[in-house]
Image (spheres, grey):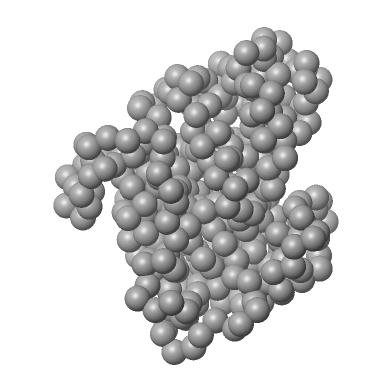
Amino acid sequence: AAASSSSSSSSSAAPRSARGLERWPMGVRRFRALCLHGFRTNPLVMELQTAMLAANMDDCLELVFLPAPIEGTVPADKDIGAISDPPFFEWWTADESSDDELRTAIRHVARHMKSSGPYDALIGFSQGAAVLTALLWTAQVLRRSSNSDVRSGSLGADDVELLRGLVMPRVAVCVCGVCPPASLLSIVLPPVSVGDMRNVDDDASKVGCKISVPSVHVIGSADKLKDRSVKLAWDWYHGGQESLEDGSVAGIEATGFKRLASMLYHSRGHVFPADVAPLAALIRERLHDMPAPYWTTSPRSCREVADPTIDDGPTCSCPLL
């Protein structure tokens, strides 16, 4: 299934601001985010979940919604079934996916990013957050590994080339995220540990190679999966920032620039927060940070990093909240 964009559902051909008062400046490329929905939902549900976030971004961020590769007719719960008709999609069929399902999910997103990207942000809800984490981690490990390090038969040569060439986003946003399945190890790692980059373990979350992409983790204090969301933030991403459960954020400096993992709590359960302004502010901040090695410090289009021959015009310079 093809991805859908939030701008395509508008009755107006020209992009408009969230307030509907001003047109987006001509010649200025908006930031783009690829959104990965949760278990047994679909792009429409994810679009409804992110509607307030899109409004708070003042049309600075174009949201694109990609359906998962496994299609079905059963929703995650009755609430999902009440707001959307089938089909519903899932990235894998259970908490512990098979190698084939996880590999298919990673390849599905990577191919879309190559054909329709680059994307400045990846936004994942629940299982979608696990997918984006698995994708970024796999791409990062492959960049640091020789061909002999990759487990024979787990990833084809085309997949390895695709993931090594992936243009990484500026920020990963995990909303009510959960950790990728432990079977992720069997896809990428050899039977024994290689160097000091990682330690092979039955639990993929204990792998020593942290994801270097700056991230924002939205965690519901009343979420039954709260502990999994916290584990995702600390075990898979650098713990460069801590957040208090009152919503305030205390940061530290690491490796010369502000990063890495920000945890933002809200009082609700396994849902997006009611007040998305703090999340929008963190996303804006991360979009305007340009950490090496994936992004330059010049105000050129991110697409130019992947292909210098393409000139989309300047990127957006929306103010921080």
In the rendered image, which quarter is residue 225 located in? top left
Q: Is residue 18 left or right of residue 201?
A: left
User: What number of labels is visible?
Assistant: 0
Quarter occupied by the C terminus = bottom right
Which residue is at the far bottom?
21
Q: Is residue 283 left or right of residue 226?
A: right
Quarter occupied by the N terminus = top left
Query: x and y percent of residue 212 in the render?
Result: 70, 44
- In depth, the one of 3 and 248 nearer the eye is 3
**What residue is shown at x 69% (from left), y 69% (from top)?**
312
- The image shows residue 287, relative to residue 242, as above or below, that is below
Q: Is residue 4 left or right of residue 217?
A: left
Query: x and y percent of residue 189 in the render?
Result: 66, 19
**What residue is shown at x 62% (from left), y 40% (from top)?**
136
Query: Is residue 241 visible to the viewer in this orientation of the structure?
Result: no
- In depth, the one of 318 and 162 nearer the eye is 162
**What residue is shown at x 56% (from left), y 24% (from top)?**
184
**What residue is shown at x 33% (from left), y 47% (from top)?**
42
Query: x and y percent of residue 112 in the render?
Result: 55, 45
- The image shows residue 241, relative to residue 274, as above or below, that is above
Query: Is residue 57 visible to the viewer in this orientation of the structure?
Result: yes
- In depth, the one of 165 and 297 nearer the eye is 165
